[in-house]
Image (tube, rainbow, N blue to C red):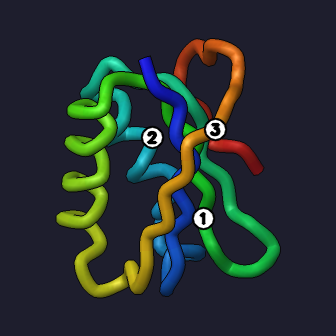
Amino acid sequence: MNTTQILFSGRVQGVWFRATTKRLAGSLPLSGYVRNLPDGRVELIVQGTDSDIESLLQKIRAEYPDNIEDIERRGTDLEELNGFEVCH
């Protein structure tokens, strides 16, 4: 089980990005949360297997092919998360 922080840059706020990410994550055995950042990026913290995390990223890219300008991934040490939430 891996925990990854993923930062999305581009036109990712105000386009239902968080709600869509939650819906897509719900189809996979993943936990975590997604939230808007003050600098205009969206942060995704996700726990799961590498293949499930990559599957989620592929689905997000397919939903927002023209909105995402950059994706930055970082490993992170968080305790086990349960469920998937949209943070406000």
Which residue sits at x=74%, y=66%? 37
Mark 1 falls on what kind of element? strand
Q: Which sits earlier in the primary sequence, circle 2 or circle 1?
A: 2
Give how far apart the Cα atoms at labels 1 and 3 are.
16 Å
Mark 2 falls on what kind of element? helix
Look at the image and tell me in which quarter the N terminus lies: top left
Where is 80 relative to 58, above or below?
A: above
Amino acid on which disc 3 is placed: Thr
Q: Closest to the observer: 56 or 24?
A: 56
What is the x, y in percent for residue 14? Answer: 57, 75
> How dense is the environment of label 1, judged by Cα within 10 Å: few (below 14), some, or many (20 and up)?
many
Q: Say left or right for 3 vs 78.
A: left
Which residue sits at x=49%, y=85%? 10
Q: How many marks?
A: 3
Q: Say left or right for 34 vs 77.
A: left
Q: Which residue is mark 3?
A: 76
Q: Are marks 2 and 1 in contact (CB under 8 Å)?
A: no
* Numbered disc in front, either 2 or 1: 1
Give how far apart the Cα atoms at labels 3 and 2 are.
20 Å
> How dense is the environment of label 2, judged by Cα within 10 Å: few (below 14), some, or many (20 and up)?
many
Q: Which sits earlier in the primary sequence, circle 1 or circle 3?
A: 1
Q: Which residue is mark 2?
A: 22
Which residue sits at x=62%, y=57%? 43
Q: Closest to the observer: 42 or 53?
A: 53
Q: Which residue is mark 1?
A: 42
* Numbered disc in front, either 1 or 3: 3
What is the x, y in percent for residue 31? Answer: 50, 23
Q: Say left or right for 7 vs 71.
A: right
Q: Which sits earlier in the primary sequence, circle 3 or circle 2?
A: 2
Where is 45 relative to 10, above or below?
A: above
Amino acid on which disc 1 is placed: Val
Which image quadrant is residue 55 in? top left
